[in-house]
Amino acid sequence: MKLAEERHIAAEPAVVWAAVLNPEVLKQCVPGCESITGSVADGFEAVVVQKVGPVKARFAGKVTFSDIVEGKSLRIAGEGQGGVAGFAKGGANVTMAAAEGGTLLTYEVDASVGGKIAQLGSRIIDGFAKNMAGQFFDNFQHAIEVPVEAEEEPEVEEGKKKGWFKRLIGS
């Protein structure tokens, strides 16, 4: 399955770049992610629970970063084993460019599965993979742009609200 899309994120490219490399952001953005540990240099170990059609599985796997061009692009690749359910692997080429009012983030995703999950058929698998990618990037955009509800008023800079991640890194 292959998918290519782009999103306009209302944040500077440096903020978007920092977020895509932050394990806490990734944990919040990956649907069903229970844990993530590691570093960008060594890769992240992750545990994700997902239901694909009638098959629910806990995938334990590794996420690696490669082809890194600081502040501009990278490749994120992951592979997970789901026991009897099978395996899932895929990756995304992600590029970022300054755009009016923020960052244009473009991604090309490729994914494949094997084992019991693969028996569900390509329509179900393709729909699931497209939905997962969409959810991840929706969550990612939300983490950067939307302020966390707090007792205090959200910070405002030149009429713009800061998302929780932007407040965390002080941009």
Image: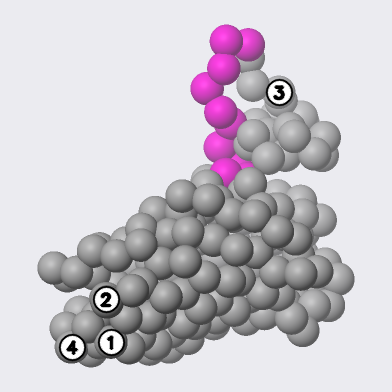
Q: CA distance from mark 2 to mark 4?
A: 10 Å
- Element under disc 2: helix
Seen in the picture, residue 148 relative to 109 is either above or below; the reply is: above
Three-letter amino acid code at disc 4? Gln
- Whether label 2 touches label 4, CB < 8 Å: no
Q: Upstream in the sequence, badge 2 or badge 1?
A: 2
Q: CA distance from mark 4 to mark 3?
A: 49 Å
Q: Is residue 10 visible?
A: no
Mark in front: 4 vs 3: 4
The location of residue 136, given as percent across then percent down, is 47, 60
Q: Upstream in the sequence, badge 2 or badge 4?
A: 2
Q: 10 Å neighbourhood of mark 2: few (<14), some, or many (≥20)?
A: many
Mark in front: 1 vs 3: 1
Seen in the picture, residue 71 relative to 84 is either above or below; the reply is: above
Q: CA distance from mark 1 to mark 3?
A: 48 Å
Check disc 4 and report the residue beneath it. Answer: 119
Quadrant of residue 64 in the image? bottom right
Quadrant of residue 126 in the image? bottom left
Check disc 1 and report the residue beneath it. Answer: 115
Mark in front: 4 vs 1: 1
Q: Is residue 67 magenta?
A: no
Residues in magenta? 143-152
Seen in the picture, residue 145 relative to 98 is either above or below; the reply is: above
- Element under disc 3: loop
Three-letter amino acid code at disc 3? Glu
Residue 85's disc is 2
Check disc 3 and report the residue beneath it. Answer: 155
